[in-house]
Amino acid sequence: MDFLRPETLAEALEIKAERPDAVPIAGGTDVMVELNYDHRRPAALLDLTRIPELQQWEDGLRVGAGVPYVRIIDELGAQLPGLAMASRTVGSPQIRNRGTVGGNLGAASPAGDTHPVLLASDAVIEVASVRGTRMIPAAEFYLGVKRNALEPDELIVAVHLTPAKGPQQFSKVGTRNAMVIAVCSFAISLFPQENRVGAAVGSAAPTPRRAPEAEEFLASALDFKNPKPLLDSVKREFGELVSRAASPIDDVRGSAAYRKHALAVMARRTLGWAWQELLAKKNGSEERPCA
Amino acid sequence: MRVNVTVNGEQRQADDVWEGESLLFMLRERLGLPGSKNACEQGECGSCTVYLDNVPVCACLVAAGQAQDRSVRTVEGLAEGDQLDPVQEAFVEAGAVQCGFCTPGLVVQAHDLLDRVPNPSDPEIREALAGNLCRCTGYEKILDAVRLAASRR
């Protein structure tokens, strides 16, 4: 096995073009588990932790693929509340110190914690190779269980997100707070100026996926100009449509039926929290509920 | 391959490092530092927690080669000579050590918490230690130890 240690992104892309079999490693929280357990024996490891371009975020927002979760929580919580919430549920403090959104995208596990947020907030994934740069909307990035739209010579460089234009919420079901692979998860983003809603489910289908019917229903049912307390019937229908967007399986973490039920509950609750935040803002209150 | 790394303030060199091996393996098997414990090898238990450039990480999830030219501080590097670190002393006094296997990871993680948050609340302590498992289930004494160490700072 080779251990390749580029110092710049350009150098990393050259290496990846010559060695498409090299497995990128950043925080190592997925890749090292596979190596430790002998589940994977790649021809080479491509260490991305020395590349400054990947460890930075810029206003706008362009978040480098190698920015660890702890920095998203500490530095970007106000601009990206949904992503920060999801990041807080990742593993443990030690894991959040190392793990990255780029790694979440590279692994493309249907259970990855940040995926529903990226989908619900219209994230665009920037990938690069010596051939050039591609901007891939999150909704087109996940292709199957642990499969993504990356070509063998490409690396994930950054995630582009707009600072939240309205309330965002994330919820995840697991057996305890820390070190939990999601049984299922859900993210919602409200875009009040555009009368639009983003909603996506995780760990409840072969890929993380949006719930378009639920999004459309909610956008037509909500009055963003004059927000009034939510009707139970709206919450219920929204939950139902979110649940229907999923196609979960029975596995060791939970049954398909449980996941469907839990998704409806999470959809109702997160909608309630998000709407409450919008109402509070309209009424001039500073109160901001959180998950 | 060869890895050059600063460990507990000392410049060290490890030879014949396999490219796929973990920082934990290198510390324990090549550099003679068995303080960090090897248990789950998947970041689940926190027993291998060490500082990497002053940030606590699971050494089992860091590739040895990623530590090249970086600085590592293990549980062996907390005491000054014979003088235990206050966190270590508090663990002894509070009876927070049973079988002792989880202790090195918990000590490093608690050490980092108290560096960042001198007077942590109970929820803050629990959150900081959520990635460290104690199978003797001595958590209450461990919480006592962290509170004791905090009170002495």
Image: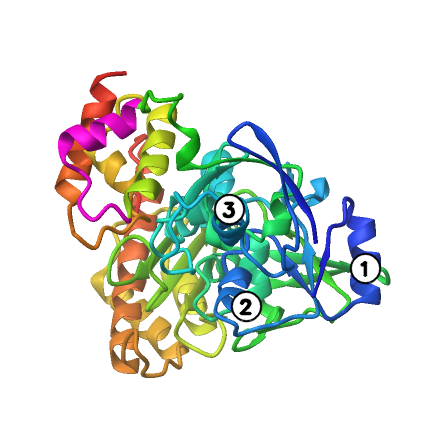
At horizontal 40% and vertical 82% (from top left) the residue drawn is: A247
As for residue B22 lying within the magenta part, the answer is no
Q: Amino acid at mark 1?
A: Ile
- Tell me the residue that label 1 is attached to: A15
Subunit of label 2: A
At horizontal 48% and vertical 69% (from top left) the residue drawn is: A37
- Tell me the residue that label 2 is attached to: A108
Q: In the drawing, does residue B105 fall left or right of residue A211?
A: left
Q: Secondary structure at mark 3?
A: helix
Percent of width and height locating residue B140: 13, 41
Q: Residues within 10 Å of mark 3 (few under 14, many from 20)?
A: many
Q: Nearer the viewer, residue A272 or B40?
A: B40
Quadrant of the rendered structure where residue B97 is?
top left
Q: Which mark is residue B76?
A: none
- Tell me the residue that label 3 is attached to: B27
User: Nearer the viewer's eye, disc 1 or disc 3?
Assistant: 3
Q: Nearer the viewer, residue B104 or A42?
A: B104
Q: CA distance from mark 1 to mark 3?
A: 29 Å
Q: Amino acid at mark 3?
A: Leu
Do pointers 2 and 1 mark residues of a single chain?
Answer: yes
Q: CA distance from mark 2 to mark 3?
A: 31 Å
